[in-house]
Image (cartoon, rainbow, N blue to C red):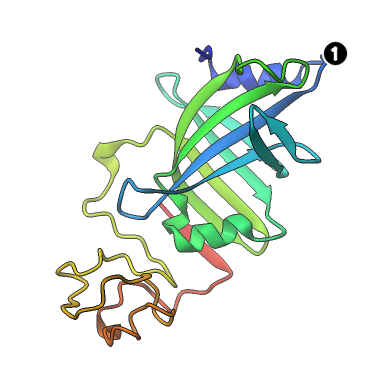
Amino acid sequence: MPKSISVTTAIEKAKLASENALLVALDVKVKQPNSDVVIEELHLVRNSEDIDYQGVTYKAFPFEIDIKIEAGGVPVVTMSGTDMTKTLHRRMQDYGGMVGSEVKFFVINTGAMDREPDVVEDFLVTSGSAKNFSVTFQLGAENALATPFPRRRQLRDRCAWKYKSAECGYIGTLPSCDLTLQGDNGCKVHENTLNFGGFPGIRSDAIRYG
């Protein structure tokens, strides 16, 4: 089993001079908004090129990590990066800023690629923002007592309602919906645009969640 230690120690360890490179990597489980359903998994590494680690390809992504220790010694982690392909930006738009997604942080020793990582920390995405080519995520243990219920995220191109729920209001025969307004299987096709649970007026180049 990987040894879990302070994320602060992990970052400092990754900065130390070493005979082998120590790479910060992330496994991200992207979840469907307002549910616990995992849509896909992303694998990122702070490196200049992709690497293969234990059968998984980790995509090079230029991100930085900043750590603050809150009262009680709980680390709050900010991850920011430049998303030139807008790969994360699109997922943030589609999946509520990726709020609630699970993030596993760990350090890979390139001199021991066949071993499990010694440093592992788990977080949730508690908020996210994107503008132009920049993306920023706050990572931490989400406080359920501070979370509004029901939680409502303002999404431009994504309906927040569960299909055929009371809020959705659709009672027709189509078996599914892609939760878009104008998509091939969206609200317009269902003749249900009045109940669309998104906010088309939100600017597409600046989004904020959480």
Q: 163 or 202, which is in the foreground? A: 163
Q: Position of residue 72 (x, y in %)?
A: 40, 19
Can residue 64 be seen at all in this image of the molecule?
A: no
Picture quadrant of residue 60: top right
The answer to whether 154 appears left or right of 133 in the picture is left
The amino acid type, in three-letter code, at marker 1 is Glu
Picture quadrant of residue 156: bottom left
Pointer 1 local density, CA inside 10 Å: few below 14, some 14–19, many at least 20:
few
Picture quadrant of residue 102: top left
With respect to residue 153, does 35 lie above or below? above
Q: 65 or 28, which is in the foreground? A: 28
What residue is at 25 percent from the left and 79 percent from the top? Answer: 195
Q: Position of residue 143 (x, y in %)?
A: 32, 35
Q: Position of residue 152 (x, y in %)?
A: 30, 59
Q: Position of residue 78 (x, y in %)?
A: 56, 39
What residue is at 59 percent from the left and 17 percent from the top? Answer: 119
The answer to whether 46 appears left or right of 102 in the picture is right
Q: Which residue is mark 1?
A: 19
Can residue 84 be seen at all in this image of the molecule?
A: yes
What residue is at 58 percent from the left and 49 percent from the top? Answer: 136
For the residue labelled by badge 1, is the local secondary structure a helix, a strand or a loop?
Answer: loop
